[in-house]
Structure formats: structure tokens, C-alpha cells
Image (tube, rainbow, N blue to C red):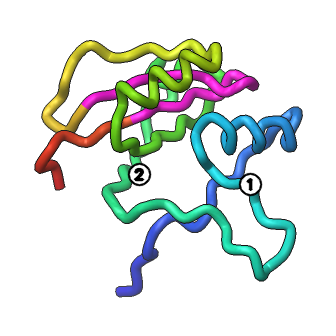
Amino acid sequence: MQKVLGIGGFFFRSQHKEMLAKWYAEHLGVDLVPADYETPCWQQLAGPTVFAPFDAETDYFGKPSQQWMINFRVGDLDAMVAQLEAAGIKVELDPETYPNGRFARLSDPEGNPVQLWQESQGAD
């Protein structure tokens, strides 16, 4: 059986797409989409990716109308949270450490939920 190799893109609607793309580049390091085919696009590091549908009634993403939430892996959650807070971005750091790591949440300027995840040492 053929299987997909990974996520090749994440596409979503935006009221202010240029501003939002710049926000992700400035605050989270997700490069802007190149204007040509010769310039490489943002590259993520290989690692685990959870692909999980949730119950339609979940409140895990925040507001009930929210259909998705992206989770980014980070190397140093505390440093990333400090960087975002220094830029005036509200971040909620989950005080619990789970078997698979630590988490924090924020919202982008359009209210889309973003989760940050630092894997536990030794997690596969």
C-alpha cells in the first residue's frame, strides 16, 4: 500500500493573508511562501506528527466555530514563550509535564489557536 510521506502544506483561510503570513514568519520562524519555484520553501525538521480528528463538540481548540488547531514542535519551550511574550503575545504555558512533553498555547492575530510542543527527552 502506498502511504503519504508527510504534510506538504497547511492551507487555511485568512482575512489578512499577507499580514498573517508575516506574523508567522516573524514570531514562529515559518518562512513566507516563495514568490518563485527556485527559492526553497520553509523546511521543518523530521519528527513526530500527530494527525487526529477530534469530536465535533470539543472545546480543545477554543471557540466552537474553530475547525482546526496547528501544533508546532519547538526545541526550547521556555525560550519560545519568553520570546513571544517579549513581543507582546499572550501565551498560556501548561504547568503540567506530560509523558510526551510540555505544551503552551497562543492565538495568531486572527484568533486561530496555535499549540507549541517540546517533546520529552527520549520521546520517539
Q: Are marks 1 and 2 in contact (CB under 8 Å)?
A: no
Q: Can residue 80 be seen in the rendering of this structure?
A: yes
Q: Would you say residue 60 sits in the magenta stretch?
A: no
Binning the other alpha carbons within 10 Å of mark 2 as few (below 14), some (14 to 19) or many (20 upward) gives few
Quadrant of the image containing the C terminus? bottom left
Q: Nearer the viewer, residue 79 or 111?
A: 79
Is residue 47 rendered to the left or right of residue 37? left
Query: Does 27 appear above or below 7?
Result: above
Q: Position of residue 100 (x, y in %)?
A: 19, 39
Q: Which residues are magenta?
A: 102-116
The amino acid beneath tag 1 is Leu
Magenta-drawn stretch, dominant element (helix, strand or loop): strand
Q: Which picture quadrant has residue 41?
A: bottom right
The amino acid beneath tag 2 is Phe
Query: Does 118 appear above or below 37?
Result: above
Is residue 122 rendered to the left or right of residue 72? left
Q: Position of residue 116 (x, y in %)?
A: 43, 33
Q: Which mark is residue 51?
A: 2
Is residue 59 rendered to the left or right of residue 101? right
Real-space CA distance between mark 1 and mark 2, rounded to the nearest whole angstrom: 24 Å
Q: Which mark is residue 56?
A: none
Q: Position of residue 83 (x, y in %)?
A: 52, 25
Q: Would you say residue 106 sits in the magenta stretch?
A: yes
**Disc 1: which residue:** 32
Binning the other alpha carbons within 10 Å of mark 1 as few (below 14), some (14 to 19) or many (20 upward) gives some
- Residue plotted at (33% across, 59% down): 47
